[in-house]
Image (spheres, rainbow, N blue to C red):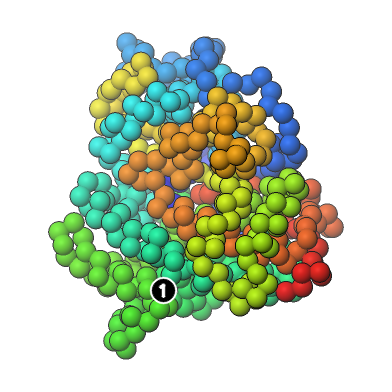
Amino acid sequence: STSLGLCHCSKQVLSSMNASAALGMTASTSNLGSCVRAPSALKRPRVCGTSRVGRATPPVRAAADLGQVLGAIKRKEGSMELPPGRVGLFGIRETIEYLQDPRAFIKKRVDMYGPVFKTGFFFKPAIVFGSKQSIEEYKMFEASLPADEALPETFRDLHTAYGALRQSGAQHKATRANFGKVLGRAALVHYTPIIARQTRDFVQGEVLEKGSLQPGYDCRQFCLRSLFELFIGVVPPEDTMMKMYDYNEGLLSLGKFAKEYTGGKKALEDLTEYIEKHYRTIRAQGKLDDPEYFFLKQYSEATDENGVLFTDDRIATTCVLMVWGAYIEAAASMGHTAWCLLRNPEAAVKVREECRKMLSLADLKAGHVTLEKAMQMKYTEAVVKETLRVVPQTAGGLRINPETRKMSGYDIPAGYTLTADPRIPFLDPANYPAPEDFKPERFLPEGAAGNSVNADTYFPGGMGQHQCPGMNLSTLMTQMFLAYMTSTFDSWAPDLEGEGTEDPAYIHVPIVIIDDKYKLTLERNWQYDM
């Protein structure tokens, strides 16, 4: 994923707060980050109030405070006309508040200042924007912005020089070209029947046997297994596969002296070694042309910006980065759509009707689903897209502004982080009337009237050179998940036994995903027995 909520902070800051509750950066495998309750928009359909999120409302001047005054002096901003908002001296207060609930943080500031404002992101001054004018201007120079300077040191190191988030220019262009071979339409055609078979075994096996679903934990584990198989042709041993969680924690660690960083570095080495050995074995056995090794075959022919073939180490590292970048994103999408259908039963009925109409019982039992069939499930796809709008998984990616410039009439100082945040246009009633209502019809011809759905108002995977290349794969996996869930079960509801709750808590780092503890009970569809 290209839009990462990454924290880069000092131990001195963390010593004054509860790290697991406020930042969630050192969580265990079963609890990846900090949690808050589900956003109110998901609890029940509701009519939009008088908020004008995303519109150019007159800025509200916040009361002056010492931190803001000292910060402006330190950054030499006295004569500049910056967007309204508050950075403070080091951006500590803003960073902590953002990590506790990013969606509420953005909405609150848009209500106060309008769709372009300054704040502190990960202890750095930042300009957050989402108005039509600012996005149009940003797109004119976004490609020239350096990529990795906005990333924390630990992330830059463990993401490696092969990672697209660290790259710019010709190097990045070559990397993206190789993405197209493994994430484009031809690749999805190849992946679809594999995903169908994987999803069938997951839903009709593990989930049906338990009679319940933990959308955070179960979907994450499933997606991890699924993507390893898609990308390297096999599911690694459990202890090897689980190292992906250690790697994730290392990426988000507080510094190179943190045990999480050390563990993440070791996990990256172990994962890369396992995949490289596997790749060399497959190649030596002449099996690269076998269907299950489609991904490895494509990368065996991949070249860099100089036309040089990728080394074995780079191929293996790329596999690690691709699995890491996709598994949480896909799992979050599955869990969020299940939750949205729970709270919007009329939409669940339509998904169930469409899936049962498009996919026969025989096809589902055999896992015989083609990309063409999946693409005909237009309403199901619209549900996935609307879920990404109502429950945004990420921010819009971070870039460093290398030189002072003008944008939307404001001075943007050199060194500021820039981010086009999708939550701003997502919540703008000018783009999406009654924006907090769940309406998949916004993404269908019959319901599009009054909605402004385009690349400037809908970019759940970020925009520009570092937008997420795997959104189509994630959407396909979620559609398949919904097809099997709605065919196997008539409904699902929160499990309120024990410590069960009506509403889920959410983890916000690195991707917004339902907390592991949240559980749904499932009502099997005996009339449509699989």
Q: Is residue 528 left or right of residue 410?
A: right
Residue at position x 56%, y 18% from top? Answer: 112
Residue at position x 41%, y 74% from top? Answer: 232
- Dot 1: within a 10 Å radius of its alpha carbon, few (fewer than 14), some, or many (20 or more) residues? many
Outermost right residue: 497
Is 318 situated above or below 367? above
Where residue 299 sits in the image (x, y, percent)? 30, 69
Where residue 29 sits in the image (x, y, percent)? 58, 62
Outermost bottom residue: 285
Kindly tell me whether residue 516 is visible in this rendering: no
Give the quadrant of the C terminus. bottom right
Is 342 situated above or below 417? below
Give the amino acid at mark 1: Ile
Kindly tell me whether residue 153 is visible in this rendering: yes
Where residue 467 sits in the image (x, y, percent)? 39, 46
Residue at position x 45%, y 25% from top? Answer: 131
Where residue 394 sits in the image (x, y, percent)? 51, 44
Q: Quadrant of residue 273?
A: bottom left
- The residue indicated by pointer 1 is 232
Q: Tell which of 447 and 281 is nearer to you.
A: 447
Q: Tell which of 244 and 361 is nearer to you.
A: 361
Q: How many marks?
A: 1
Residue at position x 42%, y 78% from top? Answer: 292
Q: Quadrant of residue 109?
A: top right
Q: Tell which of 188 and 77 is nearer to you.
A: 188
Q: Secondary structure at mark 1?
A: helix
